[in-house]
Structures are given as C-alpha cells and as structure tokens.
Amino acid sequence: MESKKAKETILNSFHENNNSHAFLIETNNINDCLTDVIDIARQIECEVDGDEHCTCKICNLIKNNNNPDLLVLRRLDKDDKEDEKIRDIEVSTKSKKLDTLKTEITTKQIDGLVNLFRTTPLVSKYQIYIVFEADKLNRNAANKLLKFLEEPNPNIIGFFITDSFDKMISTIVSRCEIYNFRYGTDNILSLLDITDKEYEKYFDQTMKLVYDLEHLKSYELITNSKNLSKKERNEILFIFKLLKRIYTIKFENIVYNYYNNLEFSNQVLDSISVNDISILSKRILLIDEIISDLNKNSIRDMSINKLFIKWV
C-alpha cells in the first residue's frame, strides 16, 4: 500500500477506537518509514487535532525527541552503551552506517523497555515503542516482547518496522496487524507498468525470482520451483511478464541510460548484476518464449523448468 494511504488507515483506526495494539510495517524505505511512524505516534498522542504544525506540549516533546512515553529501539553503535533507560534514541538514522552497527537488538534493550513501561504513561495517552529494523531482534529479545503482544495493555502500542519481512520471527508476525508502507510507488508503478494492487501482490515475488535467477544454479532453481508452479496459470504469467519488464528496464538502461537518474529505479537496476546486453537480450527472449508456452496451456512445471535450464 502507498505509504500515505497506509498511514491514514492506521490513524483512522485510532480515531474510530478500533486500533490494534501492535503493527508490523514492511517497507521499501526504512528511514522514511521511521519518520512516518513517529508522526503517527505524534498524531495519536496530540492534545489538539494532530496538525503537523501543532505546538501542544505532547507534539513539542515528540518533535524534540523528549517524550518519555515514546521509545525507539534500534541496533546500537559498537561504542554505544546499553544503559538502563535505553534512551539512546534517534529519529533520523540516515547518518548511520549499517556496517558499524551491532547485528541484533538485544535482550537487555527489551528488559529496559519492559521496566520503563511497567507504570502508566507519564505525559501521554499511550506508551508507544517502535522497533526499528525489527528483523534484527534476536530470538530471546523477541520472546521478551511477546508479553506485550500476548497480554496487550490498551495503553501500550507497538510498531515493528522492517525492510526484510522474510527474516521476521513468526511469533511476532502472527500477533501484529500487518501493513506495507511503499515509497515512490507512483513512479515505480509507472516504470513497471502495473497497478498498485498488482505491485502489492506480485512485485516481491518477482524480485525474489530475479534474485534466485541471479544467484542460484539451474538444479537449485528447479528444486526451489515448487511454490511457483503451484500458483494459478494467470499468476505465473503475470510474474513472468513482470520479470520480462524488469530485465527490459535493465537492458534499456545500459543501452540508452534511461533510468540512472531515477532514485526509485535503483532497486530494480541493482537486482541484476549482468551488464552484458547480449546476455540480457537472450534472457528477455527466453522469458518471452516461456510466456508464449504458458499462453498455449503447456504444462506449468515444464515451462518453468525450461526457463531455469536454459537460463544464461
């Protein structure tokens, strides 16, 4: 879902007193998503009407990163100290280099959160915690958080933000209301020539297929193809058409330099490591051949395996 619409949906659930106690947000831009989630928290807590220019006490505290009822948990720098207040909080992490960060959000950080949230909110309606890069929770830390999720307190709200949904611990996922915050989708939808609904349904699946084609050998691809072959023929066709479009974008960018200046195209362009136009053209023709086979109602398994076997 486009980020603005998703944000409005979550805010409306609070206005209607029909909100969840925990939200898992998968996104393609984790830093912008953090900024939006903090603004959701501000609007939820606002003493007036949630306007972006509001100067009420709560809004000012959140804008200045001083609200004791709003905590952001993130991976710490190697030199950071995990003090008992876990208040080493930054609204913007854009200046952080990920390779300088610890690999996990630790149990000690979660213990600090639990201890701070034992009491009622100090200044706000809710106590809100945001887990930034929630896929970095180690299993013990995640289990510590389950108390908040299994025995929800109506005054405690959690947001889990990730750009790696497949790495999330299942016990967390199953207890959250899930949203997608997509940024730049108007542009990328135009680039891919698909609708918002098609993007949500097929883009991640197709990008996973691109990754497999770029990194796995033929026999590994065939072994991993069962989930794809189980889909309906029209779904497989759409995935292959989107696959063709992605490789065509890469080809056109190399030949004509069409998309280098479009920031939102990086995810598509960088997913394909090959820069040889001869190889790319052969791949596009092969995908076209498989699409033709599927349109002729050929056996799905055979068509998919044909792609994997003949891939160059």
Image (spheres, rainbow, N blue to C red):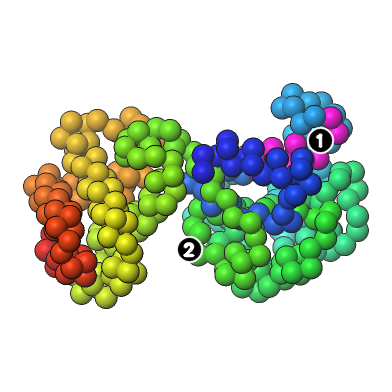
Q: Quadrant of the C terminus?
A: bottom left
Residue 288, x across and y down, in percent: 14, 50
Q: Main secondary structure of the magenta part?
A: helix
Magenta stretch: includes residue 43: yes
Residue 187, x across and y down, in percent: 39, 32
Q: Is residue 291 visible?
A: yes
**Left or right of 268: which side holds 111?**
right
Q: For the point 43% across and 33% down, which residue is it?
A: 186
**Left or right of 60: which side holds 11?**
left
Residue 231, x across and y down, in percent: 33, 64
Residue 220, x across and y down, in percent: 25, 73
The residue at which mark 2 appears reads as 166
Residue 252 falls in image quadrant: top left
| Vertical order, 276 against 56 (above or below) | below
| Vertical order, 87 against 148 (above or below) | above
Which residue ends up furthest to the front in the rendered image?
297
The residue at which mark 1 appears reads as 46
